[in-house]
Amino acid sequence: MPVYNDTVMDHFMNPRNVGEIENADGVGEEGNPVCGDMMTFYIKVKDDKLEDVKYKTFGCGAAIAVSSIVSELAKGKTLEEVKKMKPMQVVEELGGLPKNKHHCSNLGAQALIKAIEDYEAKTGKAPAKAAAKPKAKAAARSKAAAKPRTTAKAKTATKARGGK
């Protein structure tokens, strides 16, 4: 019994949209140090839609098939539609993957989303939510920095000198 279905094998043997986009609007990379898979997605954006999507993938047959289907699913869609892409959607579009290969679908979706985030950062089009988070974190850090920190060692030294 074959491990991969016909759809997966087709995308592995005849991958779509392979390559690199020169002067890409966004580039996103994701990898898995355990299995060694590495995916890099390149995007061209026009009117907030993915006009072109290409990728380079180093990995197993499932990783190549995932990259191929992700590129097809994303082309022509809005940035917001693509950012909602879930790994299980990728698995379903491929007609299934063995459980031990599901991580590949995570890599594909994440690499593409990172390419979109790269584009948004370069163009200043980052969503309002994402822009607000760093400010909130910075405010929390400065509030924490304003509080005096007393370590157990400092407390012991103070008590030894007769303080509280």
Image (spheres, rainbow, N blue to C red):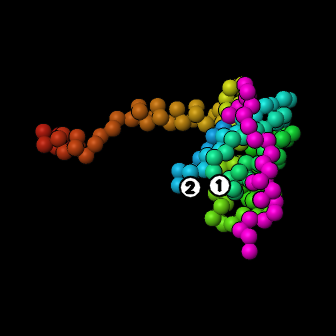
Q: Where in the figure is residue 147, as x and y percent of width and height?
A: 39, 35
In this view of the protein, which residue sits in the foreground, 45 or 55?
A: 55
Instruction: State the extent of the magenta-drawn residues as a range.
Output: 1-27
In this picture, is 51 found above or below 63?
above
Q: Residue at x 63, y 40 (%)?
A: 29
Q: Which quadrant is the N terminus positioned in? A: bottom right
Amino acid type for the residue under numbered disc 1? Cys
Say if 97 sits above or below 76 in the image.
below
Q: Residue extending furthest left?
A: 161
Residue at numbered disc 2: 35
Q: Total marks drawn?
A: 2
Of badges 2 and 1, nearer the viewer stands 1
**Rendered location of residue 163, percent (x, y):** 17, 40
Q: Quadrant of residue 112?
A: top right
Q: Based on the picture, tell me whether residue 104 belongs to the magenta stretch.
A: no
Closer to the chain start, of discs 2 and 1, is: 2
* Residue at left offset 73%, top offset 48%: 67
Q: Which residue is mark 1?
A: 60
**Residue 6 in magenta?**
yes
For mark 2, does the 10 Å Cα neighbourhood hold few (<14), some (14 to 19), or many (20 or more) residues? few
Quarter of the image for the C terminus: give it. Answer: top left
